[in-house]
Image (spheres, grey):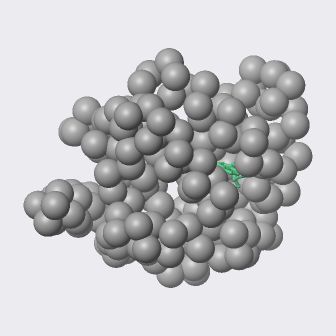
Amino acid sequence: MQLILFGPPGIGKGTQSALLVERLGLKHVSTGDLLRGAIRGGTALGQQAKAFIDAGRLVPGALVRGIANERLAEIGYDNVILDGYPRTVEQAEWVDEDFAAAGHPITVVVSITGDNEVIVERLAARGRPDDAPDIVRKRLAVYAAETAPVEDHYRQAGLLVTVDGEGDVEEVYGRIVQAIESVLVER
Ligand code: ADP
């Protein structure tokens, strides 16, 4: 299964990914983690990405596609969770193409939904440098303008299921697994 976990910053994609990895044996690909790794490693790509991340803006798509595909070439395109990728309709088209070309098309897109105020509070508690309230608001604005349309892309493709992201971690996990099962059964 090739799963895209979709939703606004701070909705819990990382937390839920960790459970899906542990319990379903999927491989986790987070472009945010990959970019932060590149920054820590002091690579040219990391240096380019840093200013965008610090400002709460999207890193240029070609860089993100490159770093994601580099990892996917190592671990394989099968049985993965994409977390934080794709984040624009253009990236979604690339993902669709790249996974189809690898012979493992996207199986399902789980969109986790929730309230912006809850998100700002959760992120302020987490304390990453780009989690400062003004940067979070910028990220939420970027999400609304550039990332939210990705939902429609996958709704039209018949791959989208939505899940309520409020409540405790296990509750949300249960909803995600149920949503995935319902899609797989329908096919
Ligand atoms: P969150 O989901 O909480 O926003 P991420 O770790 O996924 O956190 O992303 C952190 C930052 O990394 C983003 O604000 C953005 O600058 C950059 N980033 C991550 N993934 C992408 C992507 N697919 N396209 C462009 N920028 C990205």
Of the 4 image quadrants, the one containing the C terminus is bottom left
Point out residue 61 in the picture as x, y percentages from the top left corner.
Answer: 74, 48
Give the quarter of the image for residue 78: top left
In this rendering, the count of numbered labels is 0
Give the quarter of the image for residue 88: bottom right
Point out residue 186 in the picture as x, y percentages from the top left corner.
Answer: 14, 66
Q: Determine whether, in the image, residue 148 is placed left or right of residue 182.
A: right
What residue is shown at x 81% (from left), y 22% (from top)?
43
Of the 4 image quadrants, the one containing the N terminus is top left
Q: Is residue 83 above or below residue 77?
A: below
Q: Is residue 6 above or below residue 50?
A: below
What residue is shown at x 88% (from left), y 46% (from top)?
51
Nearest the eye: 14 or 105: 105
What residue is shown at x 86% (from left), y 25% (from top)?
44
What residue is shown at x 58% (from left), y 55% (from top)?
93
Q: Is residue 180 above or below residue 71?
A: below
Q: Is residue 99 above or below residue 7?
A: above
Q: Residue furthest left?
A: 185
Q: Determine whether, in the image, residue 100 is placed left or right of residue 141.
A: left
Whether residue 42 is visible, yes or no, is: yes
Point out residue 21 in the picture as x, y percentages from the top left corner.
Answer: 31, 37
Whether residue 125 is visible, yes or no, is: no
Nearest the eye: 174 or 62: 62
